[in-house]
Image (cartoon, rainbow, N blue to C red):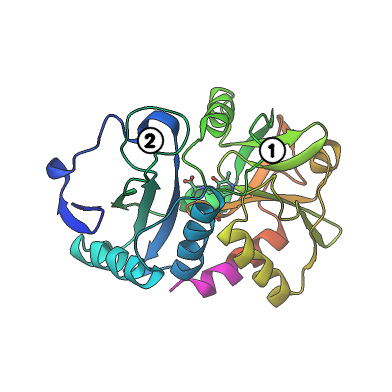
């Protein structure tokens, strides 16, 4: 497969990553993961808008217009003939001798993007997955899709070590989001999810799900819930670009509802399916 390196589509072997790249040394950059269904990119505009929004929040200048970015990513997908999978794109603050403050004068940012052919997680979407609680020790700008993912990495690893698919993070008693997903609870016909703030990533799949809720008549309350409330939910869901609308059927070894995919979850999955290009 070919790689997009800045504005060139080249062979993987020809990509040169600088050891003084600030992405490599500081995690000083931002990224996106965008899903491809049947050769079509899903919610590309939303992802590219969020990429530029993340860049703005860290004062990183992407030297291409959004239009050019769309064109370059589409060209890579076409070149690699991706049918089902995703495209990963990241932009770092560039290559410069190591010092914490921004390079002065500024240097060109470094863009890399690659595609991956994957299959959708059909078995988990039907059977649901297990989750556990992990204290949210991340910084206070979780709204930025930053390359700095150490908190998320440690949370996911803790979940995996407990034979769970996802870590449900909490700050004190308040559930925030997964290590790489947003989290929802459904109780008595109402869907609860943490409001968009600095404490969570404003997920694109989250937005699609909230639209689906409206379509199927599921009431939404964008209010945070506690760990105890989570355990008492009728249904729980996590969502991300790759996990889609994923049922959580057990939490901390305790069953959620009947310990299987719930009715609302299934309706949401169906509504989501209709939006797939
Ligand atoms: N993760 N919250 C966090 C911390 C995430 O890392 C992600 C996505 C989400 C869901 O966002 P979206 O629905 O826009 O994918 C929420 C990506 C896919 C990843 O890092 O692989």
User: Ligand 1: does it lie within 8 Å of the C-beta at label 2?
Assistant: no
Q: Main secondary structure of the magenta part?
A: helix
269 above or below 241?
below
Q: How many residues crowd mark 1 within 10 Å: few (<14), some (14–19), many (20+)? A: many
Residue sitting at x 82%, y 46%: 225
Bounds of the magenta segment: 270-277
The residue shown at (33%, 45%) is: 107
Q: Nearer the viewer, residue 193 or 38?
A: 193
Is 249 on the left-hand or right-hand side of 173?
left
- Cα–Cα span, label 1 and label 2: 40 Å
Which residue appears at 85% of the width and 42% of the height?
229
Q: Which element carries disc 1, helix, strand or loop?
A: strand
Please state if 2 lies on the left or on the right of 71 as rendered: left
Instruction: For residue 29, say whether it is visible.
Output: yes
Q: Is residue 274 magenta?
A: yes
Point out the tag, 1 or 2, that comes first from the N-terminus.
Answer: 2
Where residue 140 appears, x then y in whole percent?
68, 39
Q: Is residue 195 magenta?
A: no
Q: Nearer the viewer, mark 1 or mark 2?
A: 2
Residue 142 picture quarter? top right
- The residue to which callout 2 is attached is 22
């Amino acid at each position: 497969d070919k790689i997009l390196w800045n504005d060139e589509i080249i062979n993987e072997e020809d990509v040169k990553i600088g050891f003084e790249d600030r992405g490599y040394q500081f995690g000083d950059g931002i990224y996106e993961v965008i899903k491809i269904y049947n050769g079509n990119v899903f919610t590309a505009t939303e992802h590219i808008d969020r990429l530029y929004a993340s860049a703005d929040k860290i004062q990183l200048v992407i030297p291409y217009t959004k239009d050019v970015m769309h064109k370059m990513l589409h060209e890579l997908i076409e070149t690699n003939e991706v049918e089902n999978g995703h495209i990963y794109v990241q932009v770092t603050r560039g290559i410069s001798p190591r010092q914490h403050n921004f390079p002065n004068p500024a240097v060109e940012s470094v863009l890399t993007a690659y595609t991956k052919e994957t299959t959708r997680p059909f078995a988990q979407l039907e059977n649901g997955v297990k989750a556990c609680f992990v204290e949210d020790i991340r910084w206070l700008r979780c709204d930025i899709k930053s390359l700095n993912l150490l908190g998320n990495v440690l949370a996911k690893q803790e979940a995996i070590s407990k034979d769970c698919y996802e870590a449900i993070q909490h700050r004190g008693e308040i559930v925030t989001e997964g290590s790489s997903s947003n989290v929802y609870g459904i109780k008595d016909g109402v869907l609860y999810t943490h409001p968009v703030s600095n404490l969570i990533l404003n997920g694109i799949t989250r937005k699609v799900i909230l639209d689906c809720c409206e379509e199927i008549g599921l009431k939404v309350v964008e209010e945070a819930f506690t760990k105890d409330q989570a355990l008492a939910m009728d249904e729980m869901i996590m969502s991300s670009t790759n996990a889609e609308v994923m049922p959580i059927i057990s939490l901390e070894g305790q069953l959620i509802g009947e310990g299987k995919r719930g009715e609302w979850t299934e309706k949401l999955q169906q509504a989501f399916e209709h939006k797939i290009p």
